Image (cartoon, grey):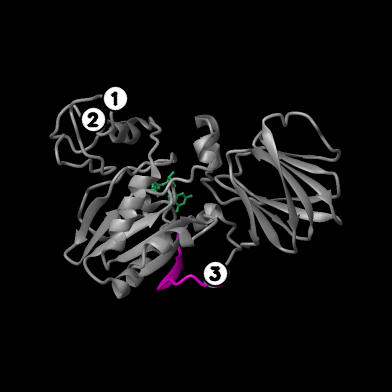
Amino acid sequence: MSSKKCFGCGVLLQNENMLQEGYVLNLEDDLCQRCFRMKNYGEYQMVTKSNEEYLNIMRSVGETKDLVLYVTDLLNIEKDLLEIRKILSNKMILVLNKKDVLPKSVKDEKLIAYFENMNIHFEDIIVISVAKNYNIDKLMKIVKQNQTSKNVYVVGHTNAGKSTLINKLIKNYSENTQELTISPLPSTTLNTVSIVLNDYLTLIDTPGLVDSKSLVNYALPELLKKLSPKKEIKPRTYQLRKNQSILIEDILRIDYKEGEKNSFTLYISNELKTKRFLNPRHKDLKELSKTTYEMKYGEDIVVNGLGFIKIVNQGTVDIYLDKNIESFVRKSLI
Ligand SMILES: Nc1nc2c(ncn2[C@@H]2O[C@H](COP(=O)(O)OP(=O)(O)OP(=O)(O)O)[C@@H](O)[C@H]2O)c(=O)[nH]1
Ligand SMILES: [Mg+2]
């Protein structure tokens, strides 16, 4: 084992065991084999990491007084933003990424107000899209205003786009040619990676917290590719009456059990197939488990890793979903 880290994911490089992470033929190499394959051949290799290591990294970030960017994916906002806030008392900016996947009509101000109402302290909240280079300059300004030292940490759940964001900042603001590895799979970044942007700013990428209850951990590669939207979502709205259902691929069934005629809008990748049934169905649910939600006016059902369903009026809704995947209800995001 050397003390050199992979430039792409931060793992310690080693040339002893091909089957273990960090393997390189030659310790002079900058990228581990896993990163090399992802980058050059788009060959993704899933690794599973214990959250304990990540929590240790978070705790060590918490011991610094450095500014933290907390990046989250607008389509997959975690159930509990406080989870990370509790570990880190650092000055923190909430960065709402992937605005490009939400319909253009959704206003930033509305999204920001939604998070402000949660009453969690952030120095600032900003909506960005790394993919569209949207608000990146504005983010850089906010970083400069709030830095407490050269170092700025980038944290958040896996797949939020932390490494993609840092790559964009490297590209836009420095001569540095280092490129972090990014992928649609969870746990791409494996350890901290420091990137010197200039004399005044060093960004530190960190591995993301893994949501063991996210659909991305259970989806096969074919589905995984379709799950995360590459384009603006075209919301699909269904007007349902009692006893009617919606099916999303074979992932989720939504049964409207009780209530007046109601509107269900799906915010999920355009590539996923959906069907509406006008009569109750009983087939194909063997492996799915049922949860009943008593919906109030203007709430979303969120399915971790899939997206969310906005339901306008109150009513009783049953959902059928793999028992390992989390769902929850929140006030409508949009
Ligand atoms: N549509 C869209 N996709 C994005 C955006 N930013 C990142 N992504 C995609 O999100 C996925 C995850 O990106 P990463 O940068 O690897 O995420 P990460 O937060 O570093 O993930 P870990 O290293 O696993 O913690 C990739 O498929 C990116 O292309 C964005 O602004 N819009
Ligand atoms: Mg990463």
Prevalent SS, magenta region: loop
Quarter assignment of residue 299: bottom right
| Residue 118 on the magenta span | yes
Q: Residues within 10 Å of mark 3 (few under 14, many from 20)?
A: few
Where in the figure is residue 164, as x and y percent of width and height? Answer: 37, 50
Give the SS element for disc 2.
loop
The CA span between labels 3 and 2 is 44 Å
Give left or right: position of 281 versus 123.
right
Q: Is residue 132 visible?
A: yes
Q: Mark 2: which amino acid? A: Tyr
Q: Which residues are magenta?
A: 117-128
Q: Earlier in the sequence, mark 3 or mark 2?
A: 2
Q: Identify the residue at image location x=28%, y=71%.
A: 147
Quarter assignment of residue 117: bottom right
List the residue tagged with mark 3: 118
Q: Mark 3: which amino acid? A: Met
Q: Mark 1: which amino acid? A: Leu
Q: Earlier in the sequence, mark 1 or mark 3?
A: 1
- Where is the C terminus found, in terms of image quarters? bottom right
Relative vertical location of residue 78 with respect to residue 271 in this rendering, above or below: below
The CA span between labels 1 and 2 is 7 Å
Where in the figure is residue 122, as x and y percent of width and height? Answer: 43, 71
Where in the figure is residue 6, as x and y percent of width and height? Answer: 23, 40
The CA span between labels 1 and 3 is 44 Å
Label disc, if present, on residue 23 of the rendered structure: 2
List the residue tagged with mark 1: 19
| Residue 90 on the magenta span | no
